[in-house]
Amino acid sequence: MSNLMTTSFTAVDLDALAGFEGRIALVVASDGKLDAGARRVNRLTKGAVARVIEAGKLEDAKAGTVVTLNFPAGLAATAVDILCLDRRPNALDARKAGASFGKLIDQGAALLVAGSNAKTVQIALGAAMRAYEFNPHKTSVDDKVRSLSVMCAKPEEQETEATTLRAIVEGAHMTRDLVNEPANVLTTTEFADRLKEMESLGLEVEILEEAELEKLGMGTLLCVGQGSDSPSKVVVMQWKGGASEDKPLALVGKGVVFDTGGISLKPGAGMEDMTMDMGGAGVVSGVMRTLAMRGAKANVVGLVGLVENMPSGNAVRPGDVITSMKGDTVEVINTDAEGRLVLCDVMWYAQDRFDPIGMIDLATLTGAIIVGLGHENAGVFSNDDDLCKAFLKAAEAEGEGAWRMPLGQAYDDMLKSRIADMKNIGGRAAGSVTAAQFLQRFVKNGTPWIHLDIAGVASVKSETTLAPVGATGWGVMALNRLVQDMLEA
């Protein structure tokens, strides 16, 4: 796990502040009133904290605003960071403030003087989420471990609450690691091996190899990877934390470890970003890690289809007709519309084998969703209002942008093929919607289903509140919350 910051909770010890070496963060409300810890730091620094407040630096400041005093006199600390945050903030504002501090934690030790703030653990979560850097392939990286000590009231209670939130951080960081990893490292085999390692957390993990996929009839999935030297695989992860008779929720992820577009070759500019085309599988993997680490009292199965889309003499061609596991035939019009070919077989397999109470698929599926929603929201498509509303509520609570998109027969009609049951694309118009319509054809009657097109949110070119440039880990928090609300309430 890349640079996972350790976090611990300790009782308030004002005498320890003067000698602490590292960054110290104080939580100060916009009214400028100081708690005991901030008053001690203010006295040690000969009134420096009070001067910041008197200068109006915190007036009308938004949650998460940070004012930094570098190398403050009277302290061994390298810096004092003053975080603007109300005493009883909401969870998202608390995370934003923590993230502003986490962004500043480079290497070594940091101290958060939280006192009795009502959202201390959420501040720590924000710091841990933001204190992330993907650097395993850099040769000049300092290997010092980052650590955050949180000085607070009732540290034992805070530590108990933090156990669940640490699991969320680990899941999100795992997703980021996978999405950031270059394709020559994260091959289909390496991806499957990393998931197999999660058996140590209590997950049941199976790896279905190509021979078994052929027996199952997964023709659409296999056709995507047939041009690559990397073998196609499906990995099934089961978390059985609920009652044995309870059917699971199924999470299905697109895992195209690299997407050249195949014979319908993508333009060269920007193709290096296609290492993130396994983002859906990355999110499913991170969610399963979180559920296992926190011991979720629910049954959830995560399935990921792992392939590489390459051009070669054996690659699938435009015009080929492929038979899916369901038995429907697909005319491949564009080999760069490959994610839906992977997902449809895995979705059918998930329903055949597990008869889930609901199914959610995730994929970096279309550029069209970025045109429509930018990088602020994932596209949400669903055949079930209740499941969709529950997910949107969970996403909003966790601050992960999501927006419901339409489905309809007119869009489905755009997939009609002259020579097969359907085409794999419906044309330029409404590209994200016709992709969702394609997938809906592989949802059985009575199965509540959501399709999440995360092409715009899985990896970004500018930092977000909780993540640096690159992979965001979007979806881990929202799906974990959905499991809590829907299956554990």
Image (cartoon, rainbow, N blue to C red):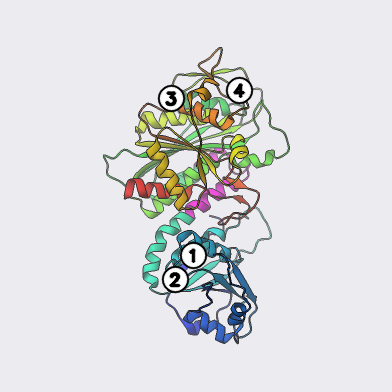
Magenta region: 170-192
Asked whether the beta carbons under mark 3 and mark 4 sit within 8 Å of each other, the answer is no
Q: Residues within 10 Å of mark 4 (few under 14, many from 20)?
A: many
Q: Give the SS element for disc 3.
A: helix
- Quick one: label 2 or label 4, which is nearer the N terminus? 2
The answer to whether 66 is drawn above or below residue 203 in the figure is: below
Q: Residues within 10 Å of mark 1 (few under 14, many from 20)?
A: many
Frontmost of labels 4 and 1 is 1
Disc number for residue 245? none
Q: Is residue 316 left or right of residue 385?
A: right
Mark 4 is on which residue type? Val
Q: Residues within 10 Å of mark 2 (few under 14, many from 20)?
A: many
- Quick one: label 4 or label 1, which is nearer the N terminus? 1
Residue pushed farthest front?
60
The residue wearing badge 4 is 316
Q: CA separation, marks 2 and 1?
A: 9 Å
Q: CA separation, marks 4 and 1?
A: 50 Å
The residue wearing badge 2 is 117
Mark 3 is on which residue type? Leu
The residue wearing badge 3 is 216
The answer to whether 162 is drawn above or below residue 314 in the figure is: below
Secondary structure character of the magenta stretch overall: helix
Q: Give the SS element for disc 2.
A: loop
